[in-house]
Amino acid sequence: EVQMVESGGSLVQPGGSLRLSCAASGFTFSNFVMSWVRQAPGKGLEWVSAISSSGNSTYYADSVEGRFSISRDNSKNTLYLLMNSLRAEDTAVYFCARLVPAAHTPPYWGQGTLVTVSS
Amino acid sequence: QSALTQPASVSGSPGQSITISCTGTSSDVGSYNLVSWYQQYPGKAPELVIYDGSKRPSGVSNRFSGSKSGNTASLTISGLQAEDEADYYCCSYAGTSTFSYVFGTGTEVTVL
């Protein structure tokens, strides 16, 4: 069974940093591109970032470009998101997701971890 | 990348059918058969109900169906039930120039 479990969410002050983790199981992690998606309280879903299966290529939404850094450790089946210069508008539940732009490959999501940016 | 456009709310009586539209552009919905739909209850993670435009994951009721015409995708829920009351989001791959995904604005479904 495909599973992804996020961790690392917490309360952080504006301007601070935080690293999220996503432990994956039930599939060959190193074969798949992986993404982070977030949802601010009472708002819709927003794709944040993605990383290629090898980790060589990374992609970011304009809203986080230059502040967030995605990475992965295929030996540990783990995805990371390092968030710097955090702002109040980064407050959201962050989901780890296996979103693959290919047919016959359904998406899978974790349950999310809450990040609150507040003083 | 602008969000895909969905109606803010749709309602129907039990047993009726409703359709939620998801309008994008030729750079996302119109270019790929990779639209997915998610059902989300308050405080819960989104759950996949449709992927690849019209495929249902195992365990999802056949009352859910998806389609696409041009730049607009649609989710139809037939035989509406009380348990269908939730928020629904569409999502499309939008990677014409670089890897990215775009989500819809979300639709609140109310069962009258």
Image: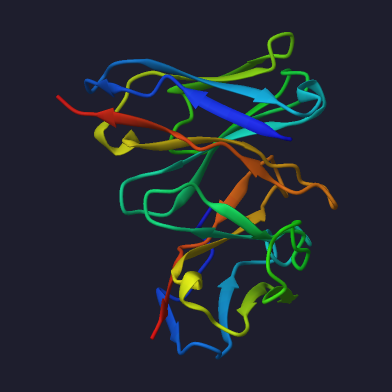
Which residue shows up at 42% across the image and 19% down it? Answer: A8
Q: Measured along the vertical axis of the image, is residue A33 above or below residue B43?
A: above
Q: Residue B32 appears at what percent x and percent y?
A: 77, 60
Which residue shows up at 75% across the image and 63% down it? Answer: B56
Please identify the residue farthest to the left as the structure is shown: A119
Kindly tell me whether residue A26 is visible in this rendering.
yes
Q: Measured along the vertical axis of the image, is residue A111 above or below residue A105?
A: above
Which residue shows up at 58% across the image and 72% down it? Answer: B23
Most foreground residue, B62 or A85: B62
Position of A14 with respect to B51 (left or right) is left
Kindly tell me whether residue B70 is visible in this rendering.
no
Q: Residue B3 appears at what percent x and percent y?
A: 50, 59
Position of B58 with respect to A20 (left or right) is right
Please identify the residue farthest to the right as the structure is shown: A104
Please identify the residue farthest to the top as the structure is shown: A75
| Image quarter in which the C terminus of chain B is found | bottom left
Most foreground residue, B60 or A88: B60
